Image: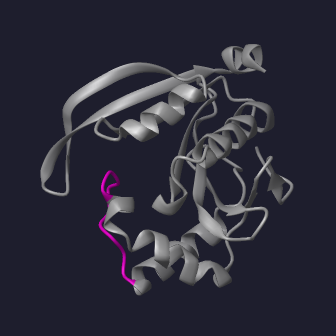
Amino acid sequence: MLKPTYPIRTDRLILRPYTPADLDALHAIQSLPQVTRYLYWEPRSREQTHEALQTKITQTELLEEGQILTLAVELAATGELLGDGMLIWHSLTHRSGEIGYVLHPAHHGKGYATETGLALLELGFDGLDLHRIIGRLDARNTASARVLEKLGMRREAHLVDNEMVKGEWTSELDYAILQREWRARR
């Protein structure tokens, strides 16, 4: 079980639960084709973003396996919403989970995704006592693959044409890190 104390602060970021006031900023992110290119969904309308936000607002703790923790990521210096990070609790028995992140393209290349990923790994390993955390991504998303590698995750699989996404076959890369590897790096 994980009930984080909010806000979670990193060197430059604040991770916190979403609120209804995040709608405009979230829509500015989720409506961009370059944001959704490697995701399962298309750019969202304001109404679709509102629906997604209603779900995100409820995802603030992990009480049982199968749940998702989704946090708004904002720039500490300005309060600007950069995107979000998520931690999925896959299995209690196997102590496994998954991380993910989506950031506005204007903030790519500044280390914010890596900083978000580090905070999510800490929540998973130190807060939830997971044994193994994975990251999955579209194989074409080389920037995200670099982030996972910077986090110390190793590439374990390249699944070729494993899913039909948005009318085309896509390939998936799977990365992972174990709790003991995470602790050894710190």
| The stretch drawn in magenta includes residue 162 | no
Tell me where residue 115 appears, x and y as whole percent.
Answer: 67, 43
Q: Which colour scheme is used?
A: one colour
| The stretch drawn in magenta includes residue 38 | yes
Q: Determine the residue positioned at 79% across, 64% down.
A: 77
The reply to whether residue 9 is in sight is: yes
Vertical comparison of 68 with 43: above or below: above
Q: Determine the residue positioned at 67% across, 15% down.
A: 181
Vertical comparison of 133 with 43: above or below: above
The secondary structure that most of the magenta stretch takes on is loop
Q: What stretch is highlighted in magenta?
A: 37-45
Locate the C terminus and report the quarter of the image it occupies: top right
Locate the N terminus and report the quarter of the image it occupies: top right
Q: Determine the residue positioned at 74% across, 71% down.
A: 79
Q: In this view, does 45 lie to the left or right of 94?
A: left
Q: Residue 45's image quarter?
A: bottom left
Q: Determine the residue positioned at 67% across, 71% down.
A: 80
Q: Is residue 166 left or right of residue 122?
A: left
Tell me where residue 103 appears, x and y as whole percent.
Answer: 52, 57
Vertical comparison of 153 with 28: above or below: above
Instruction: Give the camera-side residue of 107 and 14.
Output: 107
The reply to whether residue 104 is in sight is: no
Q: In this view, does 131 lie to the left or right of 134?
A: right
Tell me where residue 127 appears, x and y as whole percent.
Answer: 79, 38
In this rendering, the count of numbered labels is: 0
